[in-house]
């Protein structure tokens, strides 16, 4: 799915919620999410919290008057396209916010994230405020996004399994919202979407490192709804973006991590820079004198991964490989998903060292191997005769080479094998970038 983010340049989304001093959740998470969609970020602070990775240390609610004044200021000035509510600590603040939004007759999506506790522990809402939430705010909402614990408190029922979550979503929907989504962090990653009909949205359950996940999900929903996407489409895409944001979490404190709201943008940037680096590196390879001397019969390939790759499509390589014909070397275009062999090689290496993101295979000969030794490259090997039945050669071979290197999982610069029946022997060169790999190739060629 592609997004025309530039059309959001003069638009704003509003977050109404508490400030998280750790920066991982609350309005800080909302603002980062809005910014990732190129929306201006308006905010109304309902409370200041002192919290960190260990829990909530203090709550300092805003007065009703200050909340109303902030709302008036925002709506008299900003071009609001979507509203998201988060931490609303007291029944008085909930009523004030709901009454204001009703009075201005706002015609934009209102997404309610019924925040009740912090990820690391600590209540963020008074018990008596839940009735105000049900009676005042939910009836004017476009979507409400409780997790299982929040859904239990709103629906008044225990949720032990997915069927219970479906019943709870229906009960919450009947309070007047247009859509109720019971999010799946406690349901093996599956969200229950209900708008009169139940839709189950599958996803991955990623344990831990999720401070700010609820805020980030509901903020993404706000942005996508503000851009005109349907509630269901917005929910599906927001879930996918959240999963990547959790995978690329930011380390904080002793025992937790914060969701990375810019993860999907960083992926897009990373893909651009990997393509650019690899194209330049390939141009340098093709300029090297005598490059044909180290191209194997099956051809070479040069690949590079984005940071935190999930699969083969996150590895860029040369389409059709680098080949030689009548002493001339030719190469295809660079694209993601172009190679399986070099991609599997890189993915395996990155399990041991995430900073080794590039590789190239070259012709094996004892002469070239001796040159690598003379250049003091770190070297290891694997023997295809030892390959277990059913194993995937690249994954097994590279892992075996790292094991044989014997330095506590450190990745050598060179892993070679002497081939097997129907298999050409090969040398594989590893580096932190495609430029790094090309420089090693250059040093080898000087001595060939």
Image: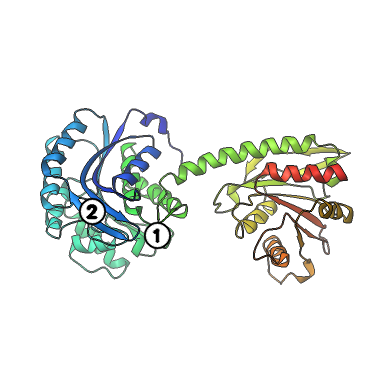
Measuring from the top left, give residue 8's x and y in whole percent.
Answer: 36, 31
Q: Quadrant of residue 55?
A: bottom left
Residue 256: numbered disc: 1
Numbered mark located on residue 114 in the image: 2
Image point (31%, 48%), residue name: 218
Question: Looking at the image, is mark 1 or mark 2 nearer the viewer?
Answer: 1
Foreground of the two, 261 or 421: 261
Q: Residues within 10 Å of mark 2 (few under 14, many from 20)?
A: many
Q: Is residue 372 left or right of residue 179?
A: right
Q: Position of residue 177 (x, y in %)?
A: 20, 49
Work out which quarter of the rendered image holds the C terminus and state it.
Answer: top right
Secondary element under disc 1, as helix, strand or loop, is strand
Q: Position of residue 106 (x, y in %)?
A: 19, 36
Q: Is residue 194 visible?
A: no
Q: CA distance from mark 1 to mark 2?
A: 22 Å
427 or 70: nearer the eye?
Answer: 70
Q: Are marks 1 and 2 in contact (CB under 8 Å)?
A: no
Judged from the image, the secondary structure of the residue bearing numbered disc 2 is loop
Q: Is residue 278 visible?
A: yes
Q: Residue at x 78, y 66 (%)?
A: 384
Residue that appears at 31% across and 42% down:
222
User: Measured from the top left, where is residue 144 in percent x and y?
Assistant: 25, 51
Q: Quadrant of residue 194?
A: bottom left
């Amino acid at each position: 799915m592609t997004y025309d983010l530039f059309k959001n340049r003069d638009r704003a989304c509003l977050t109404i919620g508490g400030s998280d001093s750790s920066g991982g959740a609350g309005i800080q998470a909302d603002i980062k999410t809005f910014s990732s969609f190129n929306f201006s970020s308006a905010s109304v602070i309902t409370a200041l919290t002192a919290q960190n990775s260990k829990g909530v240390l203090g709550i300092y609610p805003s007065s009703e008057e200050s909340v109303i004044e902030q709302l008036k200021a925002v709506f008299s000035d900003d071009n609001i396209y979507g509203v998201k509510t988060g931490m609303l600590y007291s029944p008085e603040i909930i009523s004030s916010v709901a009454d204001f939004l009703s009075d201005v007759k706002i015609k934009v999506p209102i997404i309610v994230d019924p925040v009740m506790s912090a990820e690391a522990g600590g209540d963020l809402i008074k018990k008596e405020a839940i009735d105000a939430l049900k009676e005042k705010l939910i009836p004017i909402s476009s979507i409400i996004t409780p997790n299982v614990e929040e859904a239990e408190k709103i629906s008044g029922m225990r949720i032990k399994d997915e069927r219970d979550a479906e019943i709870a979503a229906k009960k919450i929907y009947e309070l007047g919202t247009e859509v109720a989504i019971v999010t799946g962090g406690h349901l093996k990653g599956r969200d229950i979407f209900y708008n009169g009909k139940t839709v189950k949205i599958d996803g991955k359950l990623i344990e831990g490192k999720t401070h700010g996940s609820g805020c980030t999900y509901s903020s993404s929903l706000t942005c996508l709804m503000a851009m005109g996407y349907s509630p269901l489409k917005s929910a599906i895409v927001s879930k996918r973006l959240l999963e990547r944001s959790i995978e690329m979490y930011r380390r904080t404190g002793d025992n937790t991590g914060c969701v990375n709201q810019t993860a999907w943008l960083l992926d897009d940037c990373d893909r651009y820079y990997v393509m650019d680096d690899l194209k330049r590196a390939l141009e340098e390879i093709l300029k090297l004198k005598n490059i044909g001397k180290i191209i194997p019969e099956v051809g070479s390939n040069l690949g590079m991964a984005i940071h935190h790759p999930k699969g083969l499509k996150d590895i860029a390589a040369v389409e059709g490989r680098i080949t030689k014909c009548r002493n001339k070397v030719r190469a295809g275009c660079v694209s993601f998903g172009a190679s399986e062999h070099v991609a599997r090689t890189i993915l395996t290496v990155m399990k041991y060292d995430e900073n080794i993101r590039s590789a190239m295979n070259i012709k094996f000969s004892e002469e070239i191997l001796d040159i690598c030794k003379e250049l003091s490259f770190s070297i290891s090997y694997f023997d295809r005769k030892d390959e277990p039945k059913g194993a995937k050669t690249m994954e097994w071979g590279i892992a075996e080479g790292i094991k044989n290197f014997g330095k506590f999982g450190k990745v050598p610069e060179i892993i070679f094998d002497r081939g097997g029946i129907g298999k050409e022997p090969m040398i594989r060169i590893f580096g932190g970038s495609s430029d790094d790999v090309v420089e090693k190739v250059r040093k080898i060629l000087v001595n060939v």
